[in-house]
Image: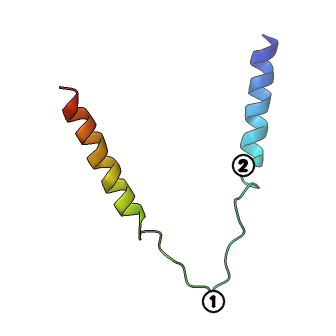
Amino acid sequence: MKKYILSIILGIALLFTANNLSAQPGFDDDVEDTPIDGGVSLVLAAGLAYGLARKAGKK
């Protein structure tokens, strides 16, 4: 019972502090945003092809 109450208290504390946590501060308005797409789509396609090849080989 003690672990249950402690986990509830910890969960509530994390909910209240989640708004204050961030990975990095926001950018100013004069900075251009850079899309993250260059190699990510190639890596996803390669992973999909690898997964399909592994699944086809197990039949």
Q: Is residue 57 left or right of residue 25?
A: left
Residue shown at the point (30%, 48%) measured from the top left: 48
Report the front residue among 36 and 13. Answer: 36
9 to 42, vertically: above or below: above
Residue shown at 36% from the left, 62% from the top: 41
Q: Which mark is residue 30?
A: 1
Q: Earlier in the sequence, mark 2 or mark 1?
A: 2
Q: Residues within 10 Å of mark 1 (few under 14, many from 20)?
A: few
Q: Is residue 39 left or right of residue 29?
A: left
Residue bearing mark 2: 18
Q: Quadrant of residue 21?
A: bottom right
Q: Amino acid at mark 1?
A: Asp
Kindly state the secondary structure of the residue where label 2 is placed.
loop
Q: Amino acid at mark 2?
A: Ala
Count neighbours of disc 2 (C-alpha within 10 A) and say few if under 14, some if 14 to 19, many if 20 or more: few
Is 1 drawn above or below residue 32 in the view shown? Answer: above
Q: Viewer-proximal residue, 22 or 16? A: 22
Vertical placement of residue 1 versus 55, above or below = above
